[in-house]
Structure formats: C-alpha cells, structure tokens
Amino acid sequence: MNNGTSQSVLELTADGTHTLYLPDMDEHYHSVNGAVQESYHVFINAGLKQLSKESLRVFEIGFGTGLNAYLTLLNASIPVEYYSVERYPLGYEIVQSLNYGKVIDPDKEGSFTALHRAPWDQDVAITDHFTLHKIYGDSNECIIPENIDLVYFDAFAPDKQPEMWNQEIFIKLYDRMVKGGILTTYCAKGAVRRMMKEAGYSVERIPGPPGKREMLRAVR
C-alpha cells in the first residue's frame, strides 16, 4: 500500500503501536486511533473469526506493513494460505522500525520479520500452519488465486487511491471466492457498497473501529 512517491513518516497511534504517514498523499497506513486495534476489529474479528473451517485461503489487497498478515498468523489455529498483493513494498529499514512484533507478541517477533524477509511471488512457510505468498504487482492486473475464503480489502481510501476501488476488481474477487466467503474492509462508502452488491455480494454495514462509525462486510 503506497503510491511509489511519498516518503513515509513513522507515527505512534493511540494504542501504542506504529503507523506510517505519507505526506504527499496526506494518508496513514492505519488509523491514528490505534493501528493494531483497527486491524483486529476490521480484519480479524469481522473476518477471520467469522469463519469456521478446517483450513483457510486468504487474499489481501495491500500487504503494506504486514500487520494484517501478522495478526492472522497469530490468531489462526488452522492451516492458512495467505496471499497478498503489493505494488510498492516497504524498505526493510522502515520495517525494522515498526514495533508490532515487540508490542503484540515479543515471543513471536521473529515471525513478523519473516513475513517481510520472505521472497516475492513464491510460497514461503513462515510457520508450520501459515504459508505466505506475496504477489509483487497491481491488484487490478495480477492473477488472483481461486477458492478464496477470506478477502482483506485494505487499499488506501477511495478518495486517495480511486484506481484500487472499481467494479472489475469486486467482480473478479467474487468469482474467485468460495460460497460463504467473506470480504471485509474498513471503508463504508456508499459507492463501494453498491459496487459490491453489483458484483453479487450480500453486503452489510457493521460498526467500525474506534474513530469510524461504520465499515463494510460482504459475503459471497
């Protein structure tokens, strides 16, 4: 999640964890009301914990800081295949400055590092139950895996990165998800909800994380 031009600035959020701010876009990677708190609410509690399966295939739009992947690794008790597409990966120097590993689970800080160290465009076993496949490229152009159980739609906001939010991507995601699969995003804009419904999803507005009244959850 980036635009390829902004120089990121490290900031501390309300829950004591970091986010990155891009001055050129006037945009944060995570909520200033709490980076980890937001990711838990939007992607783990509203997505991951809503599914009861023997294994999961997750597809994320916007690898960014790796926070969603890390929280999924820590909270999933079943085998997970985790795919994430990112056009502008963070430099490792920036990654090392993020405090997620230290704050969330110091005993498993190495797993956070491993997520970023993993080579692109190949399957990498991070733990015995979590396999990561980072896709280097554009979500509008990349090959999306089939039989997806869960989608984390975590691109920058539509007014900052409108090209990421379009009818074609929601149709493509719908076609590659299993019946009963969930797509979750922090965004609650009416235009996005209408595109999801047009693609075939059953869409609901649910309470958002601190600082945000609503978010969207869609089911195939």
Image (tube, rainbow, N blue to C red):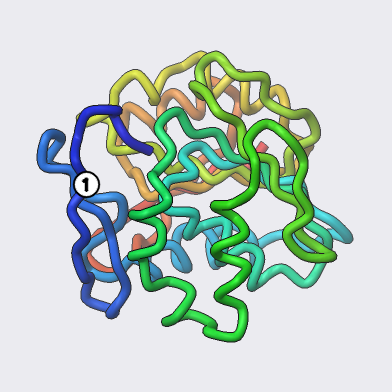
For the point 39% across and 45% down, the residue is 91
Q: Would you place residue 26 above or below residue 21 in this image?
A: above
Q: Quadrant of residue 35?
A: bottom left
- On the rendered structure, is 94 left or right of 137? left
Q: Residue furthest front?
A: 93
- On the rendered structure, is 10 left or right of 113? left
Q: Quadrant of residue 207?
A: bottom left
Q: Position of residue 5 (x, y in %)?
A: 22, 28
Q: Is residue 198 visible?
A: no
For the point 21% across and 70% down, the residue is 12
Per the image, label 1 sits on a secondary structure element best described as loop
The N terminus lies in quadrant: top left
Query: Which residue has dot 1 on it?
Result: 8
Three-letter amino acid code at disc 1?
A: Ser
Q: Residue furthest right?
A: 54
Q: Position of residue 179 (x, y in %)?
A: 78, 38
Q: Is residue 112 visible?
A: yes
Q: Position of residue 57 (x, y in %)?
A: 75, 46
Q: Position of residue 46 (x, y in %)?
A: 53, 61
The C terminus lies in quadrant: top right
Q: How many marks?
A: 1
For the point 45% across and 66% down, the residue is 41
Q: Would you place residue 194 above or below residue 91 in this image?
A: above
Q: Nearer the viewer, residue 176 or 60?
A: 60
Q: Would you place residue 157 above or below residue 164 in this image?
A: below
